[in-house]
Amino acid sequence: MQPRIDEEITFRKLETLIAFMETGNLARAAELLDVSPVSVHRALHSLESGVRCALFRHEGRNLHPTEAAQTLAEVAREVLKTLSQGVRATREVAGYSADRIRIGSLYSLTIRTVPTVLIHMKVRKPTLETELVLGSNADLLRKLRDGSIDAALMALPEGEADLVSEPLFDDEIHFAAPVGSRYAQHERVDLSTCADEHFVSLKEGFATYNGFVEAFRVAGFTPNVVMQTGDIFSLMNLVSGGIGCTLLPGRVRDVFSQNVQLIPVQPKYLMRQTLAVSFLRTRERDPNLLALLAVCRSAKAELC
């Protein structure tokens, strides 16, 4: 069994010692710790009692640290650093991350939804660091479950009992073609007339890809997909360049509006997406995730 540490030696007193060693002055140490100079003096005197040796020389009203104080301060820095790391690791194991949050998002939500959420989070929790991870719906679901991200802004995952999800807004799939195409004057596109068209699409795993497949299933034919890509902005560039047409959610209509036209499809082909913020049910008490949830609820009108 390790020798017992005297009860006079506490983490708070070690913090006081470090503050005094770094400032060299009782008053400045007290200001740094937001306590009185008397409290600093008492803490240092108590530490001397706890270690049972002199840590300071008294010269009038001034305290001068001895080599023993220097040694204890070095040890205290290591102890407090190890404790801080241990607390952080403990919180992460328990599903809490005190100083950062990792938010996953669909590429298409970086246009308006993500910036709005990040701005509101910064106002609500100014010291919280945010890391953004982009991917498909399938990628984000996997990352949620393996702990790579804390929350995800994505299409609502239906039937996932291990997740908590808050719907944010609904979006509709549109037919996307280059500006000035033969579809430009159509009020609504009939997909059944597009069997000879070249198409481009997202890869499997994206929510928009699922809507693409389902819409053409309803249309009764398999589209001629000449190229696939892994993000929605590359997909829009392909449409802009005349490589092929596609189906896109309405939320991206302003991104390439000079080059890509989004046209509604006939009602029988209409596919809707519900976008949501989701996180693991085991982490529903995490203060950072509760703050994110509150932000998303309060800013819903600004997100779409």
Image (spheres, grey):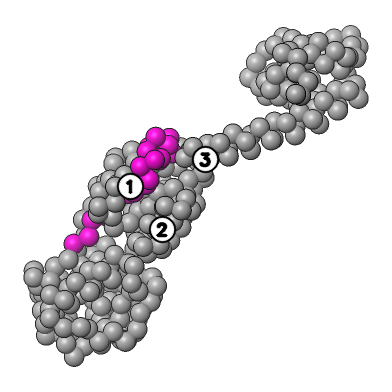
Which structural element holds mark 2?
helix
* First along the sequence among labels 3 and 2: 3
Secondary structure type for disc 3: helix
Residue 173 in sight from this viewpoint: yes
* Disc 1 to disc 2, C-alpha distance: 12 Å
* Viewport quadrant of the C terminus: bottom left
- Judging by the rendered image, the residue that carries numbered circle 2 is 142
Residue annotated with mark 3: 93
- The residue that appears at 38% across and 70% down in the rendered structure is 231
Residue under circle 1? 163
Residue type pointed to by label 2 = Arg
Label 3 crowding class (10 Å Cα cut-off): few <14, some 14-19, many 20+? Answer: few
Q: In this view, does 210 lie above or below 42?
A: below
Horizontal side of 102 relative to 302 (left or right) equals right
Rendered residue at 75%/18% (across/down): 4
Q: What stretch is highlighted in magenta?
A: 272-290
Q: Where residue 24 sits in the image (x, y, percent)?
A: 81, 23
- Of the numbered discs in the image, which one, if any, rests on residue 55? none
Q: Position of residue 214 (x, y in %)?
A: 19, 72
Q: Are marks 1 and 2 in contact (CB under 8 Å)?
A: no
Quick check: marks 3 and 1 in contact, CB under 8 Å? no
**Please, what is the three-letter code of the amino acid marked with disc 1?**
Leu
Side of 162 where 10 appears, left or right: right
Mark 2 burial class by Cα count in 10 Å: few <14, some 14-19, many 20+: few
